[in-house]
Image (cartoon, rainbow, N blue to C red):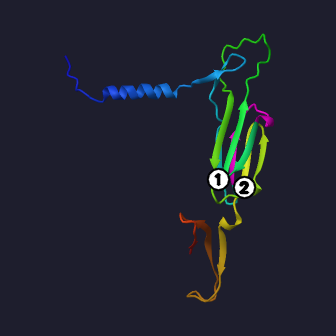
Amino acid sequence: MSITRYDPFRDLKSLQDEVNRLFSTNFSRGFGDEGIARGAWTPNVDIFENKDEIVLEAELPGMNREDFELTIENNVLTLRGERRFEKKDEADNYHRVERAYGSFTRSFTLPQTVSPEGATAEYKNGVLRVVLHKREEVKARRIEIGGEGAEGQTQKTIEAKAETPNSKGESKKSANA
């Protein structure tokens, strides 16, 4: 007979594992007119930036341009739409439906460095690409410094970073030599 050490948290861990398993499964959100369960679906999104703009790319496969909308309000970019299940023929007998259908909403808070006025969007090959241009005052600039120094009459270039607001709404300037 082996001796097993008593662990008072074993039952609690087992309960936690069960709850995690329960919430990690896909719940169906109801039945459509077709009688097929609709799964929760949100499009995958990539967001990246370069020195001039922030770019958002969302995968919306199999959707038409009329199936979704894009809005910017109060510095929040919102993508909302619906992917519908379209039964081709009444004689079709589906054995498996794995693609998710239904309505979705994705919202992203824009940083203060972005100007929503110059935003552009393009939908091509199932990918929505939204380009948001950065404000001119937040872009990094190079500044030439003239004058005499230990090196003589040479000019020196420094990188100047744009003004960024601090928590009190004041702006701070920073420069790297």
Q: Position of residue 165 (x, y in %)?
A: 58, 65
Range shown magenta: 54-67
Using the numbered discs, state the Cα–Cα distance from disc 1 to disc 2 in whole angstroms: 9 Å
User: Who's the residue at 76% across and 32% down the image?
Assistant: 63
Does residue 67 sit above or below 37 in this rendering? below
Q: For numbered disc 1, what is the local secondary structure?
A: loop
**The C terminus is located in which quarter?**
bottom right
What's the amino acid at mark 1? Leu
Does residue 48 sit above or below 39 in this rendering? below
Name the side, left or right, on which 66 lies relative to 36: right
Q: Position of residue 136 (x, y in %)?
A: 71, 65
**The N terminus is located in which quarter?**
top left
- Find residue 110 and name its label: 1
What's the amino acid at mark 2? Pro
State which tag comes first along the sequence, 1 or 2.
1
Name the side, left or right, on which 172 lies relative to 5: right
User: Who's the residue at 71% across and 58% down the image?
Assistant: 115
